[in-house]
Amino acid sequence: MRLLCPILLAASLAPLSAVAQTPHADAPTLSVETRAQDLYVSGRDRFRAKDFPGALDDFRRSLDLVDSPNTRMYLGRALRRLGRLPEAFATLQRAASDAERRSVTEPRYAATRESARAEADEIRVGIALLTVRLPDLPAGASIRVAGAEVPVTAIGFPLPVVPGEVIVEFDAPGYAPAREIRILTPGGDEVVEIAPRTEQLPPPEPAAAPVEAARVAVTRAPPPRRVELPRPWATTRVLGVTALAAGVSAVAAGVVFGSIAWSEYETLRPLPQQERDQSLVTRGEFHRDLANVLIVSGSALALGGLVLFWLSGRSTTDAQRSPLQVDLGLTAGSATLRVGGTL
């Protein structure tokens, strides 16, 4: 979706001649004019230095103080340099209109009018114009073009937009929503007609026929959910598995140290008693004793783990109970009640 320029609220291409306007009924004070002029000069310097965002800020602040066609023309130029062509077009059109109105009493704005018009014409070939026509505007109506709200004052006048797919949406209380899609080309001019249609409410449902006798039936209560009781031997099983694993590990370590001791023994066996390295003998005895301890203790631990694992094999069973069943019947002449099941 292409974005609509937010500045179109100035009724960009609406009749900007503003016949009913009185030019500068309240003239700004000298200090305000001085501040606006300083901001204009600062923005122009930034514009010439190609600092277009900074120039944009200065020009807008200057316009907030004093509405000047020259400042607005430079604002449009900065927007154009930033690639915001629809906004630039609307701003330059507004500057040309303001300059034409003021040139009647201030001829110096005639040059501003011509320059602003010329630059707006250059931009026109790169944008598209879209006119939304709504003959009877309902109260509370909302018009959106490319997702942006369109001011009521701009409805019925050309709006500058970026070429491409543009979606026009209509909403109003009591009216059916409307949606139109247009593909706009550069330099193109499109018109969208919206004819509001009132919403068609569904017909009311017919009233149900009276019932002679009411019957309430509670046939059976839903079966209770099965409650899993905690297993008393779960902890014992975990301890058994842990002990078994530790015992097997100890036995494996004992076998490893036993292999080391046997290797050292095989190394010393061919040598006479007096030629054997005493440190090697001591180390071999240590490995032998350690292997024996690990194998014995690991075997005992593994055996204990097996016993615990066997004991944990017990389990408890849940008693099953039949759900309570209740049947209640009511008719015009009698009443019945039946209760069955196991409490």
Image (cartoon, grey):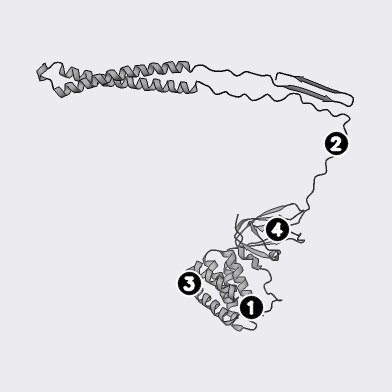
Q: Is residue 187 visible?
A: no
Residue holding disc 4: 142
Q: Earlier in the sequence, mark 2 or mark 3?
A: 3
Label 3 amino acid? Arg
Mark 1: secondary structure: helix
Quadrant of image for the N terminus:
bottom right
Q: Is residue 159 visible?
A: yes
How far apart are the alpha carbons under marks 2 and 3? 77 Å
Query: Residue 103 versus residue 119: which sits nearer the camera?
Result: 103
Q: Nearer the viewer, mark 4 or mark 2?
A: 2
210 over 119 or under it: above or below: above
Count of numbered marks: 4
Crowding around mark 1 (Cα neighbors within 10 Å: few <14, some 14 to 19, many 20+) is: many
How far apart are the alpha carbons under marks 2 and 1? 73 Å
Residue holding disc 2: 208
180 over 206 or under it: above or below: below
Residue holding disc 3: 46
Picture quadrant of residue 240: top left
Residue holding disc 1: 100
Query: Residue 72 versus residue 107: which sits nearer the camera?
Result: 72
The x, y position of residue 191, in whole percent, is: 69, 60
Q: Earlier in the sequence, mark 4 or mark 1?
A: 1
Q: Earlier in the sequence, mark 4 or mark 2?
A: 4
